[in-house]
Amino acid sequence: MVKGYYLMGSVGLISSSFTVSKVVRDNQEDEDNYNSLFQDVVAKDEQAH
């Protein structure tokens, strides 16, 4: 009976760790995309002046 609780707890822990790693990776990619977009806008603005 107790082994089932350990198993389900382990499954929950593993799935939540995958979810956290995916969210962290997505946030890093979004930040990189935003920074590159912002730098492109600044470069175009500097060329216009």
Image (cartoon, grey):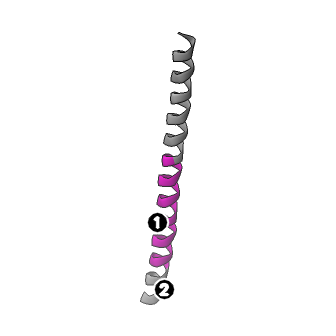
The disc label shown at residue 4, or none: 2
Label 2 environment density (alpha carbons within 10 Å; few <14, some 14–19, many ≥20): few
User: Where is 26 relative to 41, above or below?
Assistant: below
Query: For the residues carrying marks 1 and 2, which lies nearer the camera in this image?
Result: 1
For the residues labelled 1 and 2, the Cα–Cα distance comes to: 20 Å
Q: Is residue 34 above or below residue 27?
A: above
Pointer 1: what residue? 17
**Callout 2, which amino acid?**
Gly
Q: Which mark is residue 38?
A: none
Secondary structure at badge 1 equals helix
Q: Residue at x 45, y 76 (%)?
A: 9
Residue numbers of the magenta segment: 8-28
Measuring from the top left, give residue 4's x and y in whole percent.
48, 85
Q: Residues within 10 Å of mark 1 (few under 14, many from 20)?
A: few
Whole-percent x and y of residue 47? 56, 16
| Residue 1 visible somewhere in the drawing | no
Residue furthest to the top in view is 49
Quick check: 2 above or below 17? below
